[in-house]
Each structure stands twice: as C-alpha cells, then as structure tokens.
Image (tube, rainbow, N blue to C red):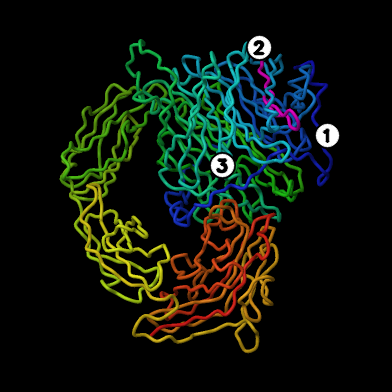
Amino acid sequence: MRDVIGAYPAPRVGADGQEVYVVPNQFIKPSQADMSEFLRSLSSRSVQSQPTGVPAPSTILATNGLSLSVGGGGVPPDTNGDVSPTHFIQWINTSWAIFDKTTGARLNGPTAGNSFFAGFGGKCQTTNSGDPLAIWDDRAQRWVMSQFTTGANASQCFAISTSPDPLGTYYRYEFVWPQTPVQVFGDYPHMGIWTDDSTKQDAYTLVTHEFNNTTSAFLGAAFIAVERDKMLTGAPAAQVGIVRFPGFDAYGAEPVHLDGTLNAKAGSCAPFVHFDPSTSDYLFWDMCINWTTPASTTISASPTRVAARTPFVPNYTTVPQLGSSVPLDAFGTHIMYRAAARAFPPGSPTRMSLVVNHGVTGPSDQGSIRWTHFDLAQANQRFDLIFADGFQAAPASVPLIKSIVDEGVYAPDTNNRWMGGIAIDKGGNIGVGYNVSSATINPRLMINGRALNDTDGTLRDEQACTPATTGSQTGSFSGRGRWGDYTSMSVDPTDDCTFWFTGEFYPTTSTNQWSTRICSFKFAECGQPGFKLVSQTPQRIEVCGTTPGADPSWDLLAGTVGGFNSSVTLTATGMPGGTTPAFSLNPINPTPGSSLFTLVGGHNAASGEYAINVSGTGGAITSAVSLQLGVSAAAPTAPTLTAPANGATGTKVRPLLTWSAVPGALTYVVEVASDAGFATIVTSKTVTTNSWTVETTLNSTTQYFWRVRPGNYCGNGAQSAAFSFTTGTPGTCPAGTTLTNVVTYGFEGGAEPAWTIGAPGDAGGTAWSNGTPIASTTGFTGNVWKVPNNTVTSDRSVLSPSITIPAAQAVILSFDTYHSFETDPPSGCWDAASLEAKVGAGSFAQLLAGRFFTDSYNGTISAGAPLAGRGAWCFPPSTGTAAKRSIVDLDDMAGQTIQLRFRATSDTNTAATAPNGMEFDNLKIDVCN
C-alpha cells in the first residue's frame, strides 16, 4: 500500500456551488399504509422528554476529519471509520486517511478509495464509486476495506489486510452481482463481522439494497455472507464461498456486527435486523451457514418478531436547518449503521448484547433517536456456563433467542435528532452519537450514552462533538437534501472502553462544503468492578387468582463486569398488600450468582397492576430491576348496556355504544351483529374503556344487535344481555326534534362570509381557489372551492369564517365533494386531503373517520408523505366523478364557536389521473332541537 498511495491521490474538488459527484443512493417510498393515528399517539409514551441532569462523558479527542476540500469526491460523504490498537481510519466518498489516536493529526492520506485495488484489475481498480466501509476485525487483527462498483457488472470489492498495518499488503476480492434475468446494482451496502466459537459460522456478512440497474426498480434487500476465514488466508477467489439470499422486503436492514475479542457461542447463526413500522416489531433473520456445502446454507423463511415495549413511529419527514430552505434526509426507513453486538464472559448481565438505533417521531413531531438494547442467547443457555466444566457439546447451528433488555427515545427538547451511530463497551455502557438540527440551529454532531446502571430508558445529557459554531447545507442533490447517509460508532480495542464516533457537519453555511468530525469519549465506569441485577425470566407475570398455581417468582442474576466479586444484598419494594418477599439466596454470594425471588401470597393478591422494584447493593454499587405483576382475583361479571337504549330508533350509523364499567375488567369485546343470534357479526372491537364509537358505517334504517363481554387475566367474563337499535337516515334529525339551519355556503360571493386560503405552515404547489368545478366532474352548481393534486411537496389549506353553533341535541355538517389523489394501494395515500376543526381558541384538530356518516376517509397517508398515518381522502368517492354528499357528526361542538379547515397535502412527483385533487360545494351546518 505504501508504494501505491502516491498514484491514487484524492479527487480534486472545485469551489462552493460547483458541480460535485453525487454518491449513488436509490431512495424508495416506504409503503406503510396501516400506520394509524392511534399508534402515533401511543408512540409518545415512555419518551425521554427531559435531560437527566447527568452529563455524558466529554470528548477526549475532537478533531476535523476529511472534507469536500480535503479528500472530497462526492455528496454526501458516507462518513465511517474504525479504530485499531494503533490507528483510526476514516473513509469517506471517495478517499480514506489515517489519523493519530492521541493528537488527531492526519498521518496519511487522503488517498483514493480504489487504491486498495491497485494492480488488481477490473472495476475495483479502475472505478471509485464510493459507499465505503472500513472495519477493524478485532479477532483477526486485520483491516477489512470494502466499496461497491456501479453500472454494468456491478459488484462489491473487498480488501483484507495481511497484517494489522493498514499500509501493508492486502488480499483483494470482487463479488459480481447477477446480470440475468436483470442487471443487479447492490446499493447502500453495509457489512458486519460474525464469528462463533466453532468457527463454522464465521463470515463477513453484508446487506445490499438491490435495484434493477436499467429501470432502477427496487428488487429487495439481499442478505449475503462471504467466507471470512479463507479471505484472511488469501485463498484464491474460486475457493472462497459466498451465499446470497435476495428479494427481502427489508429496505434499511443491517447485518449484526460483532465487536470485541469474544466470539458468539458455538453454532450461533448470523443475524440480520430491521423493524416493521406498522407493528413496532423488530425483525430478525438468521443465516445458518454451511461453508462445506454453501448451497445448504439457510435463512429464516420469515423473520422472528420481537415487539418493542413501546410503539414507535419512524421519522419519515425531513429535517429543517437554520438559514437554509433545503430540508435534510432523515433516513427514518433504516436501522442505522452499525447494528453493534458484543459477547461477554459467562456470568455477565448478558451473554451477548446487541444495540441498534433508528430515527423516530418524537412527541412534538420532531426527529428523535430511538435506541434498543437486545439480549442474544441460545435457547435455554441465556446465562449458562457460570460454573461450567468445559465439556458441554457444541450445538448444531441454531438461531439466537432475542429479547429486549432496555429501550428509549431521546427527545429532551424540540430539536431534531437523526443519523445516529451506536456501540456497547466491555462494561455494558452504551455510546451513541448523532446529528442535531432545527429551524433555529445549524446541524451539529453530539455524543451521548448511558452507563450500565443508569435509569432504564434514559440517555445522559448530550455533549458537543463539533465546534460551537457550525453551518447549514443550502444545496440540494438528486432533488433532495442529501446528508450523511451514515455515521459510525466504534469501540477502541486497546481498552474496549473508548468510543470513537465520526459523522458529517458543515463548518459554515454553504452549498456543498461539508466536513467531518472524529470524536472519542469514555465512561469512567468502564473497566471498573460492577454488577447489574437482571431477571433471567420474563419481567412481567400475569396471575388469575381462581386458577390453581404457585406464587409468582422471578429468577434474578447479579451479573458482573470488571471482576466484581462482592456479595449483593437484595431488597424489594412496591409489593401488593398481604404479600411478602422471599429470596432463595440473600445476599448473593459469591457473585456472579442467582437468587429466586418469590412473592409469597402473590397468587391471592387483590386485583391490580403492581410495579415491584428489587434492588441489589454490593459495596458502593446499587442496581435495581423493575418487575411487573398483573393480578385478576376472578373473572369479571357481565356489564349492563346503557346506550343506545334497547330498541332505540333513529340511531346514528356510527353510534356511540356505552355500558357500565365492571370492577376487575381489563378489556371489553364489543360485537355488533345483523341478527339476534349473532351469527353474522358486522363489526367488533376489543377496547379498554366502557364505550366505543362504531368504526364501520352501518346501513341506514336497519336493525342491529350488540353485546359486550369483559375480560381479564382469568379470561373472558360473563356476556352482557343483547340490545337492539335501528339506524336512522344520515343527515336527518332524531325522532321528536326539528332541523334548523345555522349556516349555508354556496361559494357564489355576495353577502356570504368569505372563506380564506392559507394557514401557518402552508407551502408548496398550487393553493386552493374559488371557481368553476374541476373539469369532468358533475353534480356541482356554480363555484366550488378546489385544489389540484400537486406534484411537489405541499401543504395547502382553506379556512371557513368563525361559525357559532347554538346549543342543540345534534349538529350536522354536510357538503358536496369530489376527491382523487395519488394512492399507495391497497389502502394508502401518497397525496390526500382531510378535514379539521378548531373549537374556540383551541388548535385545529382533524375530524376523525368516526364522525363521518357518509363518504368517510378512504385511505391512510403513507409513511414518507406529509401527515403520515392520518386517515384521509385519496381514492375517488363511490359516486365516481359525480358529487358525493358528505355528512359529518359535530354533536360535541354544540354551543361552541368553530372554524373548519380543509387541508390537502402531497409529496413529490406523481399525481392521480385527471380529474384529480379535491373540491367541495354547498356546505351546511344544521342543528336538531
């Protein structure tokens, strides 16, 4: 390498604003039409919305890395790097450099990325396309360098150092992706190192996002492994195994990368990880490798799902920045690089930990960092071998069991956080780095983390990695605010304690003159003796008092790090009345060691939810584990139905059903049927309160039957008696009341109070206008309010005057409408419209689907589009291009002053076929008294 560096200088870069190489990265629209407003509301729970008051470690080293002017070559930089005992290497598009770990001085470079392939021939040598990866293989003491090639015969290039010296010689390999039946381009490749004690699962694992090289159609993610052990010896390429499993619907997945010097347990299959935003599940695929017969290698036919403890909504919007109109890519579709794992010695709090991070939406709709800590263990061996005799047989290849240890969402203010990196040190402390930006601050890099015994679900208070003054990016590339693509977080193998983080920032506001930063930091706790109290059995137990069984118990482990061997004394608080704690061993001595905690009398405790805290104290260290107990003393009794009254007539087609609350009930199953025997269930729902608004529009003037059955930990309780009701005609008053008009708008001008266009935040595309109906639509008279299906990112509103509604038994809003926007079949919307209302001096809030008697929302705005997750109109109405009368329930607004807001949004590019957009006319509000 030393001999060829001079022949491969870094690319030359022009002045700010001059054209630069835009690094290939294909973006797809993330289809996720079933992300509900309910899920969005749940996602705000358990968010860390305040600082802890405990600062994260400050930087040991903070220095500028490569930049567009020093190394350059493209936008964005794809910043990544890794650390060996002697060097930190940073690789950006399209060059790399070596930095001194003490002073931060650049010792070598920048050198073109394809310098690793000098003399190798082919596209690895002659092209330098980027998306680079620099990884230190700690168990082999080698550098692994990789980048892709593009165009025809696209491939992945690997260079493996023959020694720890990054300037020495390298073994080189190229793996060409399929050319038939289509030419495959493997975009956004990310790599991990996986090894096990048997060496049979050893591999360099890779995820690529495959596209048709001709049409750019997304073909799916590919999960790939190449034969690490042979590559380390420089075996001929023909002898090196590769297995590739393409076609996974997993845009943004990561291979699990194993840090440190310890292997996974023998036979542990290599995992890959992503998430399902519609369910808040983490998804794991396990590749069980057979290098003797590579074709016998298997991968999960379907992923293993691990439910997040708290739902999350990915951040599919963009990130604002001070002094720039260009919003930045948020990358909410991805698990961010790297998915970092670490194996620990027997008796540690976990045998293997995995930490991941990704961007989610915070409680103020700001971008936030979600981090999750998993335990990975073989079945029935989670905390094994504390007292092993060394004669346990290695199992055949097996997938690891995954469970969540801890998780959190860091949103201590309204700033946006995204583009994170994460890793875990030998003491179980977690380091996190990320970008922060908002409309009032320039993007900057911050470092953060948590120590082993910090409060669950929290990170400490972030510390600066970048200088006090930074800039913003004003340039747009490939039509987007391209930023970062990734960062990286590594742990120094010298002490397995010091974190190294690198990412992108702008020293001053400019079009494209980005720079990078390299920061190191360390937790004081790392390397010191310590322990953590953990439960080896599920932390939550649910009990039915009438079902025979033992008292609830938990198997607790005092897992140790740093050579801790003091005794640990246990205490418990938060127990139900009438119960007492019992420990099979207290204190735990020696450590590491276990104690069975039994809640004596817990099986017969009173109904309720109990948070039990077990604390362990050893010397100056205290560690606690939170346990949850849910008790139902008996099955619940039958509820009494209250409304609608039995035999009621003129009931709404989306009625509110209510019943008496039942002591001890946790859930209620509500059923609505078209027959008294409930043979034909029209709609049903499991709810946790004693009311439910039917979510399906029932037929008018039709008799229905309904009943409710409560449930708890003892199962289903007694069924209620069945009631019947008969629906009325939408838009008419209940029997015994009279219809009175409050206001009518024909939108023909004159003395009619004016509607106005625009609201705070309105932007993009064509605004609403008052004029003739949309061409080819029928059933409208005179002028209408209308908006087209815009083809740029837009958010456009038209607002009514203030309307005072008198006290009334019922309030009915109705209007004629047509709507058609770009859809995301089968039920999603890329572009859409919805209706909001403001009551008094409050804020505008969406009128949800349950209010609509006719023409309710017919889609859900898809992930990646403005207002993602909202129910909205995007499909044409049932009347085709003819006007549809929409009737809306505003009963709860009687006696109030309100304002209506029709709101249309769109993403970029496609519009629905004509006629498209939305129009409405002949709007009325009537009351019944």
Quadrant of image for the C terminus: bottom left
Q: Mark number for residue 787?
A: none
Q: Earlier in the sequence, mark 1 or mark 2?
A: 1
Q: Of the residues shown, which amino acid type is indicated by label 3?
A: Gln
**Picture layout, residue 388 above or below residue 670:** above
Residue under the point 40% across and 67% down: 698
Span highlighted in magenta in the image: 146-163
Q: Is residue 220 left or right of residue 285?
A: right
- In three-dimensional space, the C-alpha distance between marks 1 and 2, rounded to whole angstroms, equals 34 Å
Q: Main secondary structure of the magenta part?
A: strand
Which secondary structure, mark 2? loop
Residue under the point 62% across and 11% down: 233
Query: In this rendering, does residue 430 appear at all?
Result: yes
Q: Earlier in the sequence, mark 3 or mark 2?
A: 2
Q: Earlier in the sequence, mark 1 or mark 3?
A: 1
| Quadrant of residue 231 within the rendered picture | top right
Do the residues bearing badges 3 and 2 touch, measured as CB atoms within 8 Å? no
**Picture layout, residue 725 above or below residue 165:** below
Residue placed under numbered mark 1 in the picture: 12
Do the residues bearing badges 1 and 3 touch, measured as CB atoms within 8 Å? no
Task: Point out the frontmost of discs 1 and 2.
Answer: 2
Q: Position of residue 109 (x, y in %)?
A: 76, 26
Q: Of the residues shown, which amino acid type is indicated by label 2?
A: Gly
Do the residues bearing badges 1 and 2 touch, measured as CB atoms within 8 Å? no
Task: Say which of 89 and 699 sits in front.
Answer: 699
- Mark 3 surroundings within 10 Å by alpha-carbon count, few (fewer than 14), some (14 through 19), many (20 or more): some
- Mark 2 surroundings within 10 Å by alpha-carbon count, few (fewer than 14), some (14 through 19), many (20 or more): some
Residue placed under numbered mark 3 in the picture: 463
Residue placed under numbered mark 2 in the picture: 234
588 within the magenta span: no
Task: Say which of 213 and 379 sits in front.
Answer: 213
Which secondary structure, mark 3? strand
